[in-house]
Image (spheres, coloured by chain):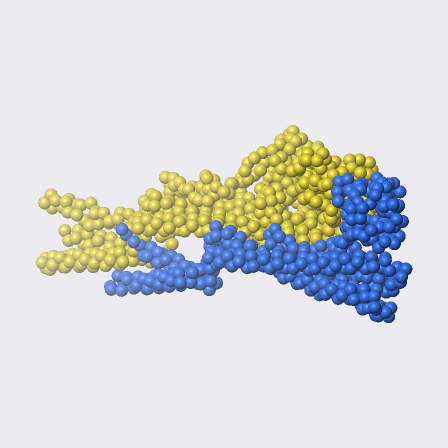
Amino acid sequence: MSVNLYNTGVNGLLAAQQQLATTGHNIANVNTEGFNRQRAEQTTSIGLHGGGGNFIGSGTYVQDISRIYNQFTYKEQLNNQSHLANADTLHKDLDQLNEIMSFSGSAINGSIEKFYQTMNGIADNPSDLGLRSIALNQAEILSSDFRSLNENIDQLEKSANGEIVQIAEKISQISVEIAKINEQILQGRNLSTSGQPNDLLDKRDQLIGDLGKFTSVNTIVDSNGVMTVMIGSGATLVAGITSLSLSVSAGNPDPKATELRLVGPNSSVAINASALGGSLAAKIEFRDEHLPQLRREIDRMAMAISQTLNKSQSEGLDLNAQQGLNLFTDINSAALQAGRVLSPSTNSGNLSASIKITDVSKVPTDEFEIRYDGSDYIMTNMNDGSVQNLGPPGSGTYATNPDYGFEFNELSGAPSLDDSYIIRPTENSASLMKVTLTDGAGIAASTAVGVAVSESNVSDGKVNIINVTDPVEARNFTDTTNKDLLVDVYEAPAGSGTFNYRVYNADPTQVTSPPPTPPSNLGAIAFGSFTAGNSAVIDMPPPPATAAFQIEITGQPIGQGALAPEEFTIGDAFGIGNGKNATFMALTQEKGVVNNGRETFSQSLAISTSDVGAKASSAELVSDTAEALYTQAYNRNQEISGVNLDEEAANLMKFQQAYQASSRIISIANTIFDTLLQASR
Amino acid sequence: MRVSTAQFYFQNSQQLSNKQSDVNEQIGYLSSGKRILTAKDDAVSFGTLAGYKDGLMNIEKYQRNITQAENRNSLQETSFANAEDLMQELKQLFVQANNGTLSNDDLAALGKLASNSQAQLLDIANSKDETGGYIFAGFQIDAEPFALQPDNSVNYLGDSGIRQVQIAKNVMVATNQAGDAAFENVSNSIGDFTPNYITNTSGVSVTRAVIADPSVYDDLTNPPDFTFDFSLPNNLTVSDGNGAIVYPNTPYVAGQTIAFGGVEVQISGNPLPNDKISLAPEENISIFDTIKKAVDWMNTPQTPGNAVQHSVDYSEILTQLDSALNHMTSRRTDAGVRLQLVETQDSNHMDRELNLAKGQSNLEDIDFAKAVATFEQSQVALQAAQQTFVQIKGLSLFNYI
């Protein structure tokens, strides 16, 4: 009897000890991350058949020490953690991009403003060498601003790539650790079939939690307690006790667009990074979507500014009466043209191609892919999916239809079946933007030819000089070859709305006879007619010579009859005090150039900056929401598995009392035995 | 609902860091005074704001150009005002010289004064501005535009170039007047032709000779110069440069309009037979030519032989001097009109600038009262979170056992 009591006491004591140990374990691990509180389950020992036909209980024992763990709340927390990591990473990256864009963007705006300010000064005072030199300086600052913004974007790309490598390494490490734990659990299971290796399980769950920050995770536990881990949309990272690793390899054709591969013991397979979730997917989204989009917009702007100013330069004459040279790097230089076509190393053909920009205002910021399907080049717009068939190889130059403002040129070689090429029409425009003019005198402020309106003109007809492609030749044609280039226009017949024009050399020292009375066109350099509401455009010099400029007649030059037509004289306008071309250059600041002529440079810049700002702002909202959701999931999980010190403190007291009470039983049992011994003396 | 210890701390630390970043953000806004620091703060307003800033920058650009345009056109106005005064003086001298009682020496002295006026006008025409360029040379600003020849005539070496600057989105204003328009293209007071009196015994003068109907004036078939032959008894024949008759032998009534081939001519006075006048086309007469004629006239003493012609010449030159004076006035008015345009645009810009600045401020600047209140609120929230944390950390059963 007393022996049983003794046993019961000892049972109770031992049970209380284990409870205290478990409580102590919980308390000690209150700050351990991923710790699930453990609880010792006490059960009564089987009752013994005692005297009197009764079952007398024989104490208690600890049946199982288990961790309080709900796999559903845990999975919910894991999911939300991945979402949070994804949203947070994207938010931080876009924030950084937003800051860079806002400040660099306003710097570029300021440079553009200052350059045009100087241009306006040159328009007023074209012979001032100081102003010209300042203009070149401002142009240099502008191009350097573009280059440094491009470098900033490069830097962001580089650090995103670096972080991707680090994340991949961490994931691989976690994979190895999980496989080890799986092995330990399996071994432990082989040795004994009872008891849960709670701390190992906790550790493994903690690792899964860490993994969840980097990518979205799914797990399956088999009957042996071994866990298979899958990341993204089903790629297996840990298969039982075998771990695979994640490696990063250079992209093809753009080496900086790195790709992820899942490497196993016998094979490696590429992974679709965007399905991965977590911070890894966010980094890749940032690097592959948001950064390139901004970079292409910046590149397009650099291209637009370069082309606009270069074209203006080419239409005028500099201080030495020479055609203006390019102010910035030519947008169709050989290096830029070739750099716009990226050819993956998997291509088996040897085609080398380039892209030439024909109309800057139409160039989009989209990326294209040209694929040779065996008979034709098929061009796909990667952003909206539209497809064009360019035609079979061998034609040399291919225009795009609808017109994207560029043409595809075959330089040499030929493609093989299924060869594909990535086309980036704006690539490198900002990084290669430089001022190529070294001398301020090279700014083409002067126009080449001008129009003098006769005083006896009576109607509102106007003659303009447009499309000056060779200003030196234009001057030659109107000053040397034809010293008095006369354009006369009048309405014939009267009231018909048809205007007849003629272009003559009226200089008496150069021609034997003066221009005949209209309507005769004898000896005219050019002649023709146009109707009211239209305009006449005449190439000068006329075909078959190459046109150096064009004469445009607009309005209603009615004149006063055949003997008194409206007269316009076109002559040399060059002078060091001629700032008309500089005026035209200055007007391009407010002219729409980008995006089909709808946006000026500063508008385009503002739109790009707002875009980034909007993205950053919504990323912040998404991140805030994800944080709130995660907090809720975390709370729910903690509600079940978290350690509450107060509860444990109360438990300590409880089990301490139980221990004391049980030890009391032992001492009572001892006393009973003593009493028994005493009685038998 | 059970709450774990870790949860307590997690929640509090999250709150603390959130509140702290709130306070930080408010400090950023307060210290810069702007509600929109980067595009993220309000992407939609950022675009509008960029538009306002753009507009303000453009106005600044226009105002700089306006200053330049104002300076240049003021200089021109002053120059023409001076030229006007000179012409006035010259005219007076000329009138003075038409006094039969003056001796040849007196005339010569007046002629000398007139020459001075000519030199002064030449000086004005060759003036430079602060950049060192000649203001009346068109685009050829590095070379003196008006060159005095040994015979006192003046050649124009510049061109007709006009420089323009942009003073509003669609408004350009010229900043110079070309020398030819300013000084060479003074309209001929007689019309489109200048008379040359080959034989003038009657003292007639051509008062008007214009191409009245350009649509029938054919100078290829009947080229000038037109010769007017007066013959007995009272007939006039006009022939063209080739000798062809354009106005057949017709009696001429004094004061009638002679019309032929689109040309109309009026002669004052009674012509005598054998008088011969030829008309050469000249639409514009350079001011310097007029002055030269005046000076030459003053230096030519009147003799009984040339008395009639001298007198005819006098009235012609006087009328032309008037025309030249008017031309100077109208050039000055031109400059004045431009100055007015510039002024109007300037005040437009100032109004617009005010509007834009207001719009920009509405969007961009923070409402200080509101911002300070928000800041105080954030601060209080942070303090509350901090104090709550302190309270919580003291709550533990372990303190009591």
Q: Position of residue B140 (x, y in %)?
A: 77, 57
Q: Residue A538: in sight, yes or no?
A: no
Q: Position of residue A583 (x, y in %)?
A: 67, 53
Q: Position of residue B371 (x, y in %)?
A: 41, 61
Q: Residue shown at 55%/44% (left/top)?
A: A259
State left or right for residue B309 relative to residue B337.
right
Circle count: 0
Q: Residue shown at 87%/64% (left/top)?
A: B301
State left or right for residue B197 relative to residue A622.
right
Front in this rendered view, residue A418 or A311: A311
Front in this rendered view, residue B65 or B366: B65
Q: Residue shown at 75%/40% (left/top)?
A: B215
Q: Residue shown at 42%/50% (left/top)?
A: A621
Q: Residue A533: in sight, yes or no?
A: yes
Q: Is residue B299 above or below residue A392?
A: below
Outermost residue toward the top? A375
Spot the yellow chain and give its letter.
A
Front in this rendered view, residue A380 or B209: B209
Spot the blue chain and give its letter.
B
Q: Is residue B373 above or below residue B269?
A: below
Front in this rendered view, residue A518 or B223: B223
